[in-house]
Amino acid sequence: MKRGWPVRAAQVIVAVLGGASACASRAAPDVVHGEQVYVRCMACHALANDRVGPHHCGLFGRLAGSVPNFDYSPAMKRANIVWNDKTLDQFLAAPLKMVPGSSMTYDGVADPKDRSDLIAYLKRANDLPACAPRTPDAGGTKADRPRR
Amino acid sequence: MSFFHMPTPIAARRLFIGQSGLVLSGAAVALLAGRDALAAASGAADPKDVQILNTALGAELEAIAAYQLGAESKLLQKPVLDLALSFQGHHKEHAALLAKTIEQLGGKAVIAKANYHFPADQLKSQADVLRFAAKLEQGAVSAYLGAVPLFANRDLSKAAASILGDEAMHWAVLRQALGETPVVPSAFMA
């Protein structure tokens, strides 16, 4: 009877480690890391202001190509995409593959975890002071808050 | 900040701008415009390449405006002010070259906006300005890195990589000025 114990213990350990591994692969998005990933976007984007690219406050639930007075590419205007976790993940992976002709001429964020964290940050960023109500000429306002 | 009080780098930079810079600019013009001028003449330029260059030009024009904001903020003291103006000068060179290349490829170069929205109200010290510039430069490195593999013309990829290297140097120097360590935080950029 005792000889069976090591085998059963090993089975338990394997099961626990396997479970831990599975948990790790489904780890919650890391918003802090997502903010670090967002720096990659900052040559062209900001949360609150339109720059080379449109502002990101209120991104979730927004129709692509719909920020007023922003000069979108024709491709983005007719993309007919609503930004959510799924569409953002797809777009960020390969922007020009999802929207050929977009002026976001960027190869994409290859790492799925980076994308997941970035998307979590963009979602959370809506609650940051940068996305708080501002003067009328500012890019992003609470009026842009997402329809979650 | 002792880095900026060392006379040698400044002298070296002046020497670089006064001599080598002109040579490099000439080489870059040839790199960006040489073969593609011929390609454009035959209508063979890839429209996607023109779009990539225009997006880069838009970002360069904005960077020029950002450094102008910093220069006029009265928050930058010499020699940091000189450094910022030097970096702005690089961005002006990038922008001029990109615009020229776009035109030679048969495209229409974007022009600077009448107004840019920067978080000026959050810039209250020299460090704030440097931190703001460092983020833009880091973003520029990533933007060029994301553009390099997209060009149909590999000569343009090479030219974009050349600009990327310049942006990376700006970023590192700004981090040094801010006292951020390590100055070069990783072996790879993303």
Image (cartoon, coloured by chain):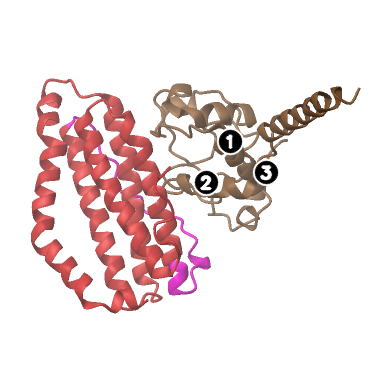
Chain colours: A brown, B red
The disc at residue B170 is none
Residue B146, by quadrant, is top left
The first of marks 2 and 3 along the sequence is 2
Q: Secondary structure at mark 3?
A: loop
In-image side of A98 versus B155 (left or right): right
Residue B115 seen in render: no
> Where is B176 relative to B99, above or below?
below
Query: Cα distance, mark 2 to mark 3?
Result: 19 Å
Instruction: Name the main secondary structure of what is drawn in magenta.
Output: loop
Q: Are marks 2 and 3 in contact (CB under 8 Å)?
A: no
The first of marks 3 and 1 along the sequence is 1
- The verdict on residue B25 being magenta is no
- Name the residue carrying label 2: A38
Who is closer to the viewer here, A23 or A97?
A: A23
Residue occupying the point 28% across, 68% down: B83
Q: Chain of mark 1?
A: A
- Name the residue carrying label 1: A113
The first of marks 2 and 1 along the sequence is 2
In-image side of B75 versus B96 (left or right): right
CA neighbours of label 2 inside 10 A, class few (<14), some (14 to 19), many (20+): many
Query: Cα distance, mark 2 to mark 1?
Result: 13 Å
- The verdict on residue B124 being magenta is yes
| Amino acid tagged 1 | Lys
Please give the range of residues in magenta: B105-129
The disc at residue A145 is 3
